[in-house]
Amino acid sequence: MFGCLIAITLAGCTYKNIDLEKLERVTFTKDITPIFNNRCTICHREEGPAFSLKPSVAYQTLKDHGLVNGNNSILLTKLKKRHSTSLINENQLKKIELWIKEGALEN
């Protein structure tokens, strides 16, 4: 019985990658802000040395710093090189990538 419980627990922990082709439209408010709020504001807060990604200012900060300009996104490059393995998982990264490909709208 204990073996069954372990098997069920491990099966429930599988990680499914998001397929960008099947993902519905990504919105800044519903999809991106929660990622920033849960993962990025640890360092990117108003009191810290890095720019703020708190929900009330995140979009304007990204635009002001030129981090989301079309397909050549500095934000995406920085996330892939510096942060993706430590704070942002692959699914979250794919959502951010799709949001940028869709025009990085404040929606």
Image (cartoon, rainbow, N blue to C red):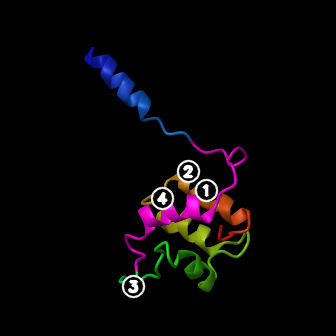
Residue at 73% in and 63% down: 102
Q: Above or below — where is 64 with respect to 7?
A: below
Residue 61, picture quadrant: bottom right
Quarter in which the C terminus is drawn: bottom right
Residue at 35% in and 84% down: 47
Dots 1 and 2: beta carbons under 8 Å?
yes
Q: Nearer the viewer, mark 1 or mark 4?
A: 1
The amino acid type, in three-letter code, at marker 1 is: Lys
Dots 3 and 2: beta carbons under 8 Å?
no
* Label 1 element class: helix
The answer to whether 25 appears left or right of 95 in the picture is right
Q: Which residues are magenta?
A: 17-45
The answer to whether 2 appears left or right of 54 in the picture is left
Badge 1 density bin: few <14, some 14–19, many ≥20, Cα 10 Å: many
**On residue 88, which mark appears?**
4
- Give the distance between the C-alpha atoms of the residues marked 3 and 4, in whole angstroms: 20 Å
* Label 4 element class: loop
Viewer-closest of 18 and 25: 25
Viewer-closest of 50 and 85: 50
- Give the distance between the C-alpha atoms of the residues marked 2 and 4, in whole angstroms: 8 Å
Considering only order in the chain, which callout, 4 or 1, is on the residue closer to the N terminus?
A: 4
Residue occupied by mark 1: 95
Q: Residue 98, how many percent across, how many down?
A: 67, 58
Q: Residue 84, how many percent across, how many down?
A: 50, 60
Dots 1 and 4: beta carbons under 8 Å?
no
Viewer-closest of 84 and 42: 42
Considering only order in the chain, which callout, 2 or 3, is on the residue closer to the N terminus?
A: 3
- Give the distance between the C-alpha atoms of the residues marked 3 and 1, in whole angstroms: 26 Å
**On residue 49, which mark appears?**
3
- Give the distance between the C-alpha atoms of the residues marked 1 and 4, in whole angstroms: 11 Å
